[in-house]
Image: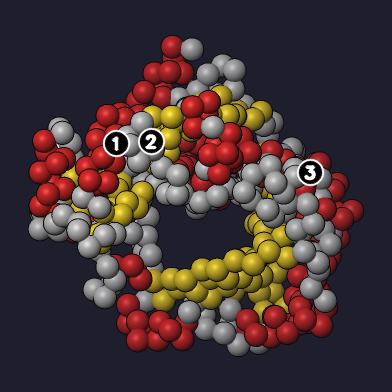
Amino acid sequence: MRATLAIMHAIAATLVLCFCLLHPITSNAQPPSNISSCLLYNGVRNFSLPLSPSYATLLDSSIQNLRFALPNVSKPVALIIPTSKLDLQRAILCTRNSSLAIRVCSGGHSYEGTAWVESGATLGELYYAIGQSNRSLAFSAGSCSTVGMGGFVSGGGFGLISRKFALAADNVLDAILMDPNGNALNRGSMGDDVFWAIRGGGGGSWGVVYAWKLQLVHVPHNITVFSLNRTGPLEQTAKLMHKWQFVGPHLPDEFYLSICIPTGTSNGNVSMSFTGQVLGPKQYAMLVLHHAFPELGIVESDLSEVSWIESTAKFARLNLTVDLTNRWFGIKHYSKRKSDYVRSPISMQDTIKIIEYLSNGPQQGSIQLDPYGGAMARIGSSKLPFPYRDGYLYSIQYSVSWKASDNDRADEYI
């Protein structure tokens, strides 16, 4: 236990929450200088105002979508990085007294298979700490390693092993919530309704979650991963997408199989990629996929066996597992993303129309289909404020990104 607590304390010492304090929420709000005085008086030193030398660098590092860095977008009147629970409590009280709106930039283990993780940690940092402690344990969360734990769990948290182990929010055992008065509340003291709401109901409504107690899950030592590209005439690729709807959401719980379809064409052909992860060896993956989706044409050489921690780095497009601890992307874009949730399969005729539309679109766009079902479908829609459970087949994420030189066409892309 001491060894695992040491890991958690090392994380806690280096991970922080970033507060973005926005424009006043009442007409009697105090100016930014007053928030500065309050913070200093209460011993909170790690903050930055717009005229501070570090402000621009800190703000830029917290923005992943460059649309929000444009001059016409409102910027925070202060950035606060509390490095302890006491800092967090005092920062909340100061911002409340200044009538400023708070936005939280948030994107340890035990041998019993649980972990306390602070909201300032990224998914990648959590994964790496788990992998260093016990390679047979995992946590059900997403593939984007720089996403913060606080926002991810607050939104429900879908990931590659959610069909087996449900959402991140389904695996929360306890939490520490800072209320508007600066009180630290655990599961018992915050009450059942609030504990229900913070797990999937969105962040920032009930207070600031300082930390989460997570249920870790046991995974096999060998996990199968693959990524396949399939290119062909429009109707041929449309058939693959149409068939996937009857396969992806209904595979055994150990399987995750998604599709990504970029916009545009190559020599008149349409391309799509299939990304998969199977909690088991190659032989099991081959047996099931050959039976359920022979049209995919998968062969054993397409598959690789890795550990769970290695798979998280692979799906985050990182070379080494230690790279999971990097908190920021090197390349940023201007982008827009939206999602839909599908309850019944799209007809073949409409699938062809979708592929046609995508093939005529700008090169910077794509759609991604992520399978639901499995364990998620066996959990009631009212258990958490995340309703997309039984009866939902998959989600569709629409994405588009562009360069600064195309900002005059931003509305067109969106």
Tell me residue 409's x, y (percent).
40, 86
Nearest to the eye among marks 1 and 2: give it. Answer: 2
Asked whether the residues under the numbered discs 1 and 2 touch, taking CB atoms below 8 Å apart as contact, a structural biologist would say yes
Where residue 378 is drawn, which disc sits there?
3
Label 3 neighbour load within 10 Å: few <14, some 14-19, many 20+: few
Three-letter amino acid code of the residue under disc 3: Arg
Left or right side of 394 for 114: left
Three-letter amino acid code of the residue under disc 2: Met
Tell me residue 171's x, y (percent).
61, 35
Please name whichever residue, 311 or 159, is drawn nearer the observer in this view of the structure: 159
Left or right side of 359 for 320: left
Residue marked by disc 2:
178
Q: Earlier in the sequence, mark 1 or mark 3?
A: 1
Q: Secondary structure at mark 1?
A: helix
Please name whichever residue, 42 or 98, is drawn nearer the observer in this view of the structure: 98
Q: Earlier in the sequence, mark 1 or mark 2?
A: 1
Left or right side of 351 for 318: left
Q: Residue at x 55, y 68 (%)?
A: 338
Tell me residue 127's x, y (percent).
50, 36
Where residue 21 is drawn, which disc sits there?
none
Q: Residue at x 26, y 75 (%)?
A: 72
Tell me residue 393's x, y (percent).
76, 59
Residue marked by disc 1:
88
